[in-house]
Image: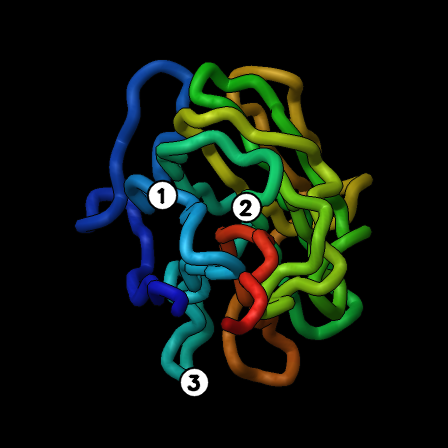
Amino acid sequence: MHRAVMLTCLAGSIGCVSAALAQPANFFDAGAVTVPATPSSTSDGIDLSGLFDFGDGVSPGETLGVKWVKVELSNAVSGDLYFDTSVSIFPQLRDAVLAVYSDTGVLVASDDTTSGNRNNGAGLSFGSLDERTPPEFPRLRGQNGSLAAGTYWFAVVAGTGSQVSLGANSWNASTTQGYVLGFGDNDTYIEWAMQFGNTTPLPPPA
């Protein structure tokens, strides 16, 4: 079952945290995540789509540039454990990039629309190479290797790989693109979710 995030993250609001040094100034803190090792073939997730302001159907919502989410991973992800995140963007002519940085600002992995869920979606996948249950993001099967326990900063960035700049350190993610979010024909709609669990086979029936 996914935990839905029904919160627009704006500077100074509840759920948004300001950080010192070079860390992202505005982000949503998703808290601690423990990837379940038992029972077999179980999964959990977080629906992050509620972080985005799509307006009220009359007035447009926010202009998406870079959106940050902080996650504290309680256990290492390897073997049968997995941690996946995927973003889908509509309409299909628009793109997004996903990136994850360590708590010291080092770029861990990124994807520019090559392995996402659908449309011009981007995806990152750590841990197990086997099919997830349920297969929420079928194309994501551990392409990005293992992931140590620790604090990570995930970013969804508007634009193509050529429009987005991802620095190797200092959480340096930027873009020359911006999408006005909303529900209108000319607006952009985005979905972002994380899924984590294990692919341990179910025991045979007694």
The residue wearing badge 2 is 83
- Measuring 76% from the left and 59% from the top, which residue is drawn there? 139
| Disc 1 secondary structure class | strand
Local packing at callout 1 (Cα closer than 10 Å; few below 14, some 14-19, many 20+) is some
| Disc 2 secondary structure class | strand
* Quarter of the rendering containing residue 109: top right
Q: Is residue 166 left or right of residue 194?
A: right
Q: Are marks 2 and 1 in contact (CB under 8 Å)?
A: yes
Q: Earlier in the sequence, mark 3 or mark 1?
A: 1
| Disc 3 secondary structure class | loop
Q: Report, in whole angstroms, how far the alpha carbon at label 3 lies from the one at label 1.
A: 34 Å
Q: Is residue 75 left or right of residue 157?
A: left
Q: Report, in whole angstroms, how far the alpha carbon at label 3 lies from the one at label 2.
A: 34 Å
Tag 2: amino acid: Phe
Outermost residue toward the front in this view: 206
Q: Foreground residue, 204 or 72? A: 204
Local packing at callout 3 (Cα closer than 10 Å; few below 14, some 14-19, many 20+) is few
Q: Quadrant of the N terminus?
A: bottom left
The residue wearing badge 1 is 33
- Measuring 75% from the left and 41% from the top, which residue is drawn there? 143
Q: Foreground residue, 70 or 129? A: 129
Which of the two discs, 3 and 2, sits closer to the camera? 2
Q: Earlier in the sequence, mark 2 or mark 1?
A: 1
In this view, 148 is above or below 45: above
Q: Position of residue 40 (x, y in %)?
A: 49, 57
Q: Which mark is residue 57?
A: 3
Q: Position of residue 92 (x, y in %)?
A: 76, 71
